[in-house]
Amino acid sequence: MHNAEILHAEKCPVIKMIGSEPAVADAIRENCPDDVDLETLDDQADLSSHLEEDGQPVDVVLLGTSPDLAVQIAQRIHTIDKFLPVIILTRPEACRPLRRTLMFSPFLGSEVIPWSSEDLTALPNALMEAVNRRRQRQRHHHALCRAQVRFEKLPHLKPELNQYLDQLLDCAPIGVMTIDASGVILTLNHQAQEILNATNRITLGGALNDLFSKDDHPVIANLRTEIATGRSPSAQRTVRLRETDSVRKYIAITMAPLCYRNTMRQPGLMVILQDVTSRVDAEAERRDAEEKLRKHVKTLRKFHEISTREDICFDEKLSGVLKLACAQFGLAAGMVTSINGEEFDIIASVGSMDLDGLQNAGLHSNRFCFRAIKSKEPYTYVGDGQGPNCSGINKSCETPVAYIGVRYLVNDIIEGTLCFWGNKAESDEFTDADKELIKMMGQWLGREWQRARSEARMRKLSSALEQAADAVMITDRNRMIEYVNGSFECMTGYSKEELIGRPAGVLRSGFHDQEFYNQIWRLISSGKAYRGELVNRKKDGSIYHEQRTITPLRDANGEITHFISTGHDITELVETQRQNRLHQSELTHVARLSTLGEMTSGLAHELNQPLCAITTFTQTCLRMLSAGEYKPDDLYYGLQQVLRQAETATEIFRRLRMFSRKGEIEECSVELGQIVGEIESFVESEALQNLINVHFDVPDRLPPVWADRIQLEQVLLNLVRNAMEAVSERDPGCRNVTITATRNEETEVTVDVRDSGHGCPPDIANRLFEPFFTTKEKGMGVGLGISQSIVEAHGGRLWLEETSPQGSVFRFTVPQAKGEKDE
Ligand code: ADP
C-alpha cells in the first residue's frame, strides 16, 4: 500500500517548509497527495510557535536554508520534539559533508536527513515515508502511555484482588500459608487452619516451626533456605505436626517463593500444606508388612537350607530348625514332645530358658500341648497365664507368656507336638505367617520321622532278606529285576549287577512253554500267589529245579507295584525222588521179571518136554515116510501126538501170560482220571529230569470204565514209558508225550498215547506184540504183549494206531462201566 493511502485513513499529513524556494514547494505539492497540508513558513520562529501550540501537530519539517542554519534549526526543533523528522534540502555536493556534520552535531535525533535539491521527484515520497514513521512512533508512544496510566492505577485495585484471592484460597482443598523471610506466619487459609488444628488467632504472627515436631525443625529450615536461595523453585517435605492431645498428624509442606514482578527482593514464601497422615500410616504399614514378609521369606529359605542339608544328621537338622523358629517367633525355648498317656515327654529341645524352672513355676507345657494336640491348626497363646485352662500359672510374670505349638503325625498317627514358648518380648500376637511356618515345620518333622522309621524298617528287612537262606528276587510290575539277595546269586551263579535291571525271564531254560509262563503271570497279576516248581537255567548253562513262590506286593492304594519271589533249589530233591521212583519202579519191574525169569526157566523145562516130544514124533513120522514103511495109523498117531504136545506148549505160554497179569482180574467201575493222576505223579520226576513235556488231556466228565485198576495202570504206564523212551533221543524242547482220553460212540473209552519219537519202521511194527521182541539193549520184549493180553482180557483192544518218523500213537479201548453203558 502506498504510504499516502495509509495516511489518508488518518488525519491528513502536515508538512512545514522553511526557506524553500517557491519552485520547490510547487514541485512537492504537485507530487504529493491532495490532502497533504503543506505550509511554507517564513522563518523558524513561526515553526516554534507551530510546534508548541496545541492544534494540528506537524509531521515533517522541510528546510531549504543554508546548511549551517538548517542544522541550527534542526537542533532547536529536536530540543522540543526529538522525534520530529527534518529533511534538509541542499546542493548535491554538500549532501555528504552535511551528513557528516549531522552525525557529530549534539542535540540531534536520528530523524534529520540531508536531501539533494536536484532529486525533487523522489522528495514527496521521502516526505510521506517520514510522515509514516512519525505517525507510527506516535502510536507506540500513545500505547505505552496508556499502559503506564493503567499500571499506575493498579495499586488502587489491589485490596479487592487480595480479598478475591483470599476467598478463593479459603475454598481451596489445600492449606495455603504465607510466611515472611524470617518464618513468621503472615496469612493462612481456612483449610490450613483445619490441617494444623489451629485458628488464625493462635498461628498468625507465630513462627512456622512452632507448629511442627521439634525433630522436624531442621527439615523445615533446610527447605526454607533451599527455596529462599533459589536452589529449587519449589520443594516438598513431609513433617510431623507437633503432638497435642495425642493427635498424630503428618503434613506434606511445599514451599515456593513470593516475589514482586519488578524486583528480585523476596517478601516471603508461600507454604502449601496437605494432610498426608493416612498416606504415611499406610506407607508405614506397608513397610512393616514388607519387613515381616522379608523376615518370613528369609526364615523359610533358611528352613529349606537346613532341612535339605546332606552333611548333617537328623538331630542336628532338628536342633537347627528349632533355633531358627525360636528366632522367628521371638521365643526363648523350642521343643519336640511325644505324647505319653497324660504326659508329654520332651524328646528334643533348644533354648536358653530353664524348662525345669518354668515347669516348677507352674507354667506347665502340658496344658498348652494338649490344646495343640487337639487341633489341626497351630495353637497359640499370648497372655498373662490367666487365659482359659491356664488358671493360676505364672501369676508373678509381668511380661506376657507366649506359646505356639502344632501337633505332628507319623504315619497318620498323632505323635506329639512341636512347640515354642517363653516370655514374648513383642506384645503382638503371632501372625498367620508364624502359624504357616510352624505348620510346615511340624509336617516336615512328621515326614522325616516317618522316613527314618521306614528306612530303619527297610534296613532290617533288607538285612533279613540278605541273610535269608531262600533265594529272593523282587521285580517291578513289568517283571524287571529290582533286587536279588545273596542266596539268589549263589543259586543262579549271576551277580546282583548282572541281574538288576534285566527281565526275570533271563533264567528261563526252555523247558516250559510260553503258555506255562502266561498262566503264572495271569495268576499273580490277579493278586494271587503262585507256588510251584520251575526248571530254570543257571549262568553256566546248567539246569536246576526250583521250588518257587511268587507273591504280588501292593502299595498303600492296593495297587500291585512289585512281585516278590522266594524259592530254593530242589534239583537234588528232584533227583533223589526220581531215583527213588526209578528204583521203586525198577524194583517192581525186576521183581516181576525175576519171578517171570524163574517162571520162564521152570516153564522152559516144562516146554522142553512137549517140544522134545514134538521133535521126536515129527522125526519118527518123517523117518517112516522116507523109508516108505509106514502105516497111516502110525502117522496119524504121530501127528496127533505132535498136535497134543503143541497144545501143551500153548497152554504153558498162556499160563505164563496169566501169571504176569498177577492173578485174577478184579473188575469194577474205575475213574480213568484217577489212573491218569497216578501215572502223572509216577512219571513226573523222570519227565522233569529228562526235560520231557508230558501232557495229560483227560476231560473231567469222562465216564468211568469197567476194569481192574492195577492192571489198567500197568498198561498205561507201560505205554507212557515206551513213549518217553522213544522221545528221549530227541532234542530238549522237542520231547513231547501226550495222553488223551475220549469217550467213543461204541460205549467205550479210547486212550491214545502219542509221542514225538522216531516211530516204528514196518519190520518192527509187525512184530511189536510178539513175545520177547525188543529193540532195546535192556528190553525184555514182553511189555506190549502183556499189555495187549490185559486189555483184551477186559474186552478191549490195543494196537499201533499210527506211526511215522515224527512219532507214534498207541491206542487202546476199554468198555465203559455198566451203569454208564446203559445211559
Ligand atoms: P521192551 O520195551 O522191553 O522192548 P515192549 O514189548 O514194551 O518191550 O516193546 C517192544 C518193542 O516195541 C520195543 O523194543 C520197541 O522197539 C517197540 N516200541 C514200543 N513202543 C514204541 C514206541 N512208542 N515207539 C517206537 N517203538 C516202540
Image (spheres, rainbow, N blue to C red):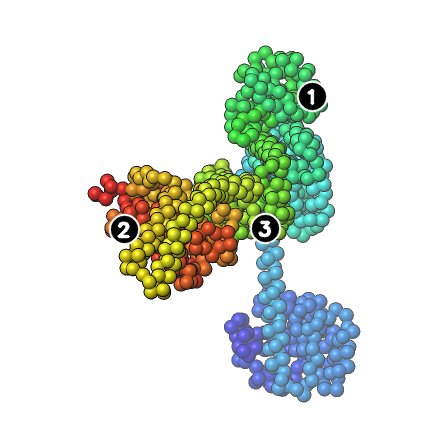
Amino acid type at image mark 1: Met
**Residue at the spot 38% in from the left edge and 50% down from the top edge:** 610
Question: Which badge, 2 or 3, comes first in the chain's sequence?
Answer: 3
Question: Which badge, 1 or 3, comes first in the chain's sequence?
Answer: 1
Q: From this view, report whether residue 254 is shown above or below residue 410.
A: below
Q: Which residue is mark 3?
A: 542
Q: CA distance from mark 1 to mark 3?
A: 72 Å
CB of mark 1 near ligand 1 (< 8 Å) = no
Q: Nearer the viewer, mark 2 or mark 1?
A: 2
Amino acid type at image mark 2: Asn
Q: Which residue is mark 2?
A: 744
Q: Position of residue 503 (x, y in %)?
A: 55, 50
Q: Position of residue 220 (x, y in %)?
A: 69, 38
Res 794 → quadrant: top left
Q: Nearer the viewer, residue 240 or 406?
A: 406
Q: From this view, report whether residue 232 is shown above or below residue 127.
A: above
Q: Is residue 730 left or right of residue 84?
A: left
Q: CA distance from mark 2 to mark 3?
A: 45 Å
Q: Which residue is mark 1?
A: 353
Q: Nearer the viewer, residue 539 or 147?
A: 539
Q: Is residue 41 left or right of residue 690?
A: right
Of the 4 image quadrants, the one containing the N terminus is bottom right
Amino acid type at image mark 3: Ser
Labelled pair 1, 3 in contact (Cβ < 8 Å): no
Labelled pair 2, 1 in contact (Cβ < 8 Å): no
Q: Is residue 192 visible?
A: no
Q: Nearer the viewer, residue 695 or 60?
A: 695
